Amino acid sequence: MEKPNRFYCIKSLFFVLMLSFQFSAFAQSEEENVKAVIQSLFEGMKTKNTDLVQAAFYPEAPMQTVISGENGSTIGSNAVADFVSRIATTPEDTQLDERILDYQIKVDGDMASAWTPYEFYVNDQFSHCGVNSFQLVKMAEGWKIVYIIDTRRKEDC
């Protein structure tokens, strides 16, 4: 059996490296696309741009909060429409600023999960901190938040 020539081996290696780079770049771009949706949600909240807020969500997405109590935790629930309405009716002189501290994003095909620790400020005054856990799905119009749950606390931030 004849040994492959050196040029053929180098060319094959280059091809394999290019393919792996393209797959890596694709995965990275999807993570960036997920991050962009989350960033647009909080930019919309900060600027009271309800179109940005609404565009980030699947319309029927549940929004939940873990409410810690002395006898354990309970869950508070909210609809996206109610959240958008509250942002729309926030007084003009009130700024809501959720500052994301880190993005931990995992993507598998058309599903993504994001874990985002945050600090929340009202008119530059610290209100609370916690973590958001997002579930997103890539739909025909792009990535949409289909579920969010968060924690909230004033200490140990």
Image: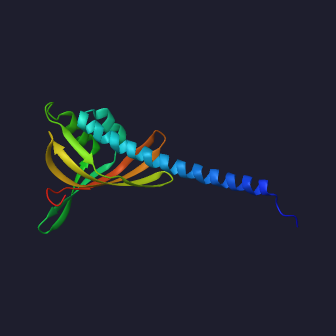
In front of the other: 10 or 21 = 10
The quarter of the rendered structure image containing the N terminus is bottom right
Lateral position of residue 33 relative to residue 63, left or right: right
**Numbered disc total:** 0
- What x and y, as percent, mark residue 36? 39, 42
Lateral position of residue 144 relative to residue 20, left or right: left
Residue 59 seen: no
Write down the quadrant of residue 43 in the picture.
Answer: top left
Residue beneath the point at 47% across and 44% down:
139
Residue beneath the point at 38% across and 42% down:
37
Furthest residue to the right? 1
In front of the other: 4 or 156 = 4
In front of the other: 12 or 115 = 12
Model colouring: rainbow
Lateral position of residue 88 relative to residue 20, left or right: left
In front of the other: 68 or 37 = 37
Residue beneath the point at 25% across and 51% down:
118
Write down the quadrant of residue 59 in the picture.
Answer: top left
Furthest residue to the top? 92
Q: Is residue 8 above or below residue 60?
A: below
Furthest residue to the left? 70
The quarter of the rendered structure image containing the C terminus is bottom left
- What x and y, as percent, mark residue 17? 63, 54
- What x and y, as percent, mark residue 101? 28, 51
Furthest residue to the front? 6
Q: Is residue 94 above or below residue 155?
A: above
Residue beneath the point at 60% across and 54% down:
20
